[in-house]
Image (cartoon, rainbow, N blue to C red):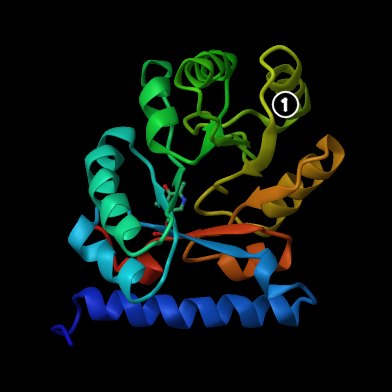
Amino acid sequence: MTAEGSFGDSDALSRLRQLRQAIARRAADCGRDPASVRLIAVSKTFSADEVWPTIEEGDQRLFGENRVQEAQPKWRDLRTRANRLGKAIELHLIGPLQSNKAREAVEAFDVIQTIDREKIAAALAEAMAKAGKRPRLFVQVNTGAEPQKAGVAPRDADAFIALCREKYGLEIAGLMCIPPVDEQASPHFALLGMIAKRCGIAELSMGMSADWELAVQLGATYVRVGSAIFGSRA
Ligand SMILES: *Cc1c(COP(=O)(O)O)cnc(C)c1O
């Protein structure tokens, strides 16, 4: 065990196990199949060695990172170690993407959740054709229409999704949102669900450490949880 107030490997592992059980319970309480809610462990800022026990002993497979450059070396290492144990990792990009990083993102990630403008859609389409690799793609919606925040505005979402599909041939598998920090999350989760439904999109990535229970209730198929597993970030 680690000192009080810090989060060592063993803490992350026990937190992960408890969280998985809590998510499954919550899903069942909402009348949902627990297997329909998948947990993305958000490992940004934590080192490969800090993350490893959740893979080796905890059997966690889905991870989220928000920076391409941080993820590349870290996950090259972790994937190699996981592959040796026959464990396939699924890595999600959950942070903003710049078009000049599209190529690297396509190579490093299995799912890219943050498409939010035409320039990115175009860059990803080109990078995927060149790499011969097709990560699953989600569109990020700025449900709170916050000026400083990434994501397509809710009123532009349907047209943007259609553009991704029709002009760039991108298959949009899901939607993602990050509600404003000081607002009730539920209207944002409900809005994301409505947009997904009318656009025929199955996956909803919503809910973090503070609000994943609400997200499960409102239909999340992926929750993205970092600090509740790995501890607070420096
Ligand atoms: C960091 C991050 C998370 C995880 O946040 P916690 O509050 O630590 O659970 C989830 N989603 C995104 C997009 C993030 O950047």
The three-letter amino acid code for the residue at tag 1 is Ile
Under circle 1, the secondary element is: helix
| Quadrant where the image shows the N terminus | bottom left
Say whether residue 162 is visible: yes
Q: Looking at the image, which is closer to me, 168 or 189?
A: 168
Q: Looking at the image, which is closer to me, 216 or 154?
A: 216
Q: Looking at the image, which is closer to me, 232 or 182?
A: 232
Residue 31 position by quadrant: bottom right
Residue 61 position by quadrant: bottom left
Vertical side of 74 occupied by 37: above or below: below
Residue farthest to the right, as pictured = 198
Looking at the image, which residue is at 48% across and 41% down?
A: 110
Residue 147 x, y percent position in the rendering: 53, 28
Looking at the image, which residue is at 72% across and 80% down?
A: 28
* Left or right of 55 in this view: 24: right
* Left or right of 168 in this view: 162: right
* Left or right of 233 in this view: 134: right
Say whether residue 234 is visible: no
Looking at the image, which residue is at 30% across and 42% down?
A: 71
Residue 59 x, y percent position in the rendering: 41, 71
The residue that label 1 is drawn on is 161
Residue 182 x, y percent position in the rendering: 52, 54
Vertical side of 123 occupied by 63: above or below: below
